């Protein structure tokens, strides 16, 4: 199917199912722009995850051409906004953690860029990478839409060499009131849980991923206290950790929308992401039946 047909074939549908907003990226296979690349970005991993879990993903993104989207499955509904460049990343993994470089960031995505027929999906995931989603996007969606975000791209800056560093999330107060759940990693908050304190002024549900240690659900209770629920990991034989957080966030969002239960959603997401890291790129992302089969064999909480 031609890319132009892929981009427009759902234009007459009234509603999307799972909407994903953010830049697709070129992820370099080496450390320089001369290296080869593969498709990356939160929305790319999220789209494949949603498909494998039996849902219908739609993407709103910016990239230089349809050629940059060719690795996405043909079932993904794509709304491509024009750009002279495609956002490009180099990810270097060391014993001390990941080092990132950002090159050629594409322009922002604004509320007016979201087509009308995408504004009432069952669920939406905002996945900024380079601060490209403007604050007005979060308030665009209907009251019955479950809205989640992975905020890493609002918490990044890069220097003249492209080296990525963390920064304060300046637009948080404009975005958080319009979210239902925030999913982020310990890396995003520099391993400092106190950085979540301001978030609970706006949100009652936050999920923090903890790499090989699973994830923790933080819920603000009626009395104002924060309850913590630790969700254990599925042991994995890691091959490629890139995209694990995006796989987690998407599968958590989907299962939360289906069940309303954040504990079961986090367990489901832990398992999905753990399978995802056991192969290169998106090739390890499991089917729904594989995840549910594991959950049935290893129930949580474990039976005594």
Image (cartoon, rainbow, N blue to C red):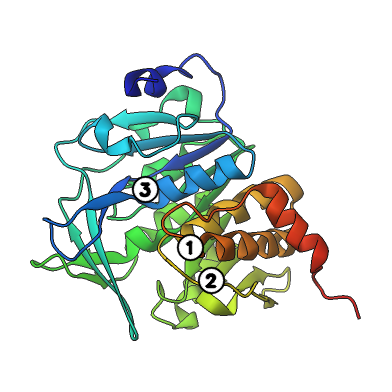
Q: CA distance from mark 1 to mark 2?
A: 10 Å
Report the mark closest to the observer, 1 or 2: 1
| Disc 1 element | helix
Query: At 20% from the left edge and 63% from the top edge, which residue is drawn?
Result: 30
Q: Secondary structure at mark 3?
A: helix
Q: Which residue matches tag 3? A: 135
Above or below, 161 relative to 154: below
Label 2 neighbour load within 10 Å: few <14, some 14-19, many 20+: many
First of labels 2, 3 by sequence position: 3
Residue 93's disc number? none
Would you place residue 220 above or below residue 28 in this image?
Answer: below
The percent position of residue 73, horizontal first and vertical second, equals 45, 35
Query: Along the polypeptide, which appears first: circle 1 or circle 2?
Result: 2
Residue 244 circle label: 1
Q: Are marks 1 and 2 in contact (CB under 8 Å)?
A: yes
The residue at the far right in this view is: 304
Q: Is residue 72 above or below residue 147?
A: above
Q: Quadrant of residue 275?
A: bottom right
Q: Nearer the viewer, mark 3 or mark 1?
A: 1
- Give the crowd class for mark 3: few <14, some 14-19, many >=20 residues within 10 Å: many
Q: CA distance from mark 2 to mark 3?
A: 24 Å
Q: Quadrant of the N terminus?
A: top left
């Amino acid at each position: 199917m031609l890319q132009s047909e892929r981009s427009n074939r759902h234009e007459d549908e009234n509603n999307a199912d799972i909407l994903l907003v953010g830049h697709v990226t070129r992820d370099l296979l080496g450390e320089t722009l001369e290296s080869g690349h593969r498709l990356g970005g939160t929305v790319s991993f999220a789209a494949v995850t949603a498909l494998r879990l039996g849902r219908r993903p739609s993407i709103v993104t910016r990239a230089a051409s349809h050629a940059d989207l060719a690795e996405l499955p043909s079932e993904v509904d794509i709304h491509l906004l024009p750009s002279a460049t495609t956002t490009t990343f180099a990810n270097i993994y060391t014993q001390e953690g990941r080092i990132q470089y950002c090159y050629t960031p594409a322009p922002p995505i604004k509320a007016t860029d979201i087509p009308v027929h995408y504004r009432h999906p069952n669920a939406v995931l905002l996945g900024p990478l380079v601060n490209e989603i403007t604050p007005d996007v979060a308030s665009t969606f209907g009251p019955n839409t479950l809205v989640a975000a992975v905020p890493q791209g609002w918490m990044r800056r890069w220097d003249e060499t492209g080296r990525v560093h963390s920064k304060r999330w300046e637009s948080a107060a404009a975005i958080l009131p319009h979210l239902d759940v925030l999913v982020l990693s310990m890396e995003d908050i520099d391993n400092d849980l106190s950085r979540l304190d301001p978030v609970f002024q706006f949100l009652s549900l936050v999920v923090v991923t903890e790499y090989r240690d699973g994830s923790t659900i933080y819920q603000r209770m009626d009395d104002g206290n924060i309850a913590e629920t630790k969700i254990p990991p599925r042991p994995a034989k890691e091959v490629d950790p890139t995209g694990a957080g995006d796989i987690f966030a998407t599968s958590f969002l989907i299962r939360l929308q289906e069940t309303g239960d954040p504990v079961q959603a986090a367990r489901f997401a832990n398992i999905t992401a753990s399978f995802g890291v056991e192969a290169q790129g998106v090739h390890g992302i499991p089917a729904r039946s594989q995840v549910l089969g594991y959950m049935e064999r290893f129930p949580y909480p474990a039976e005594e």
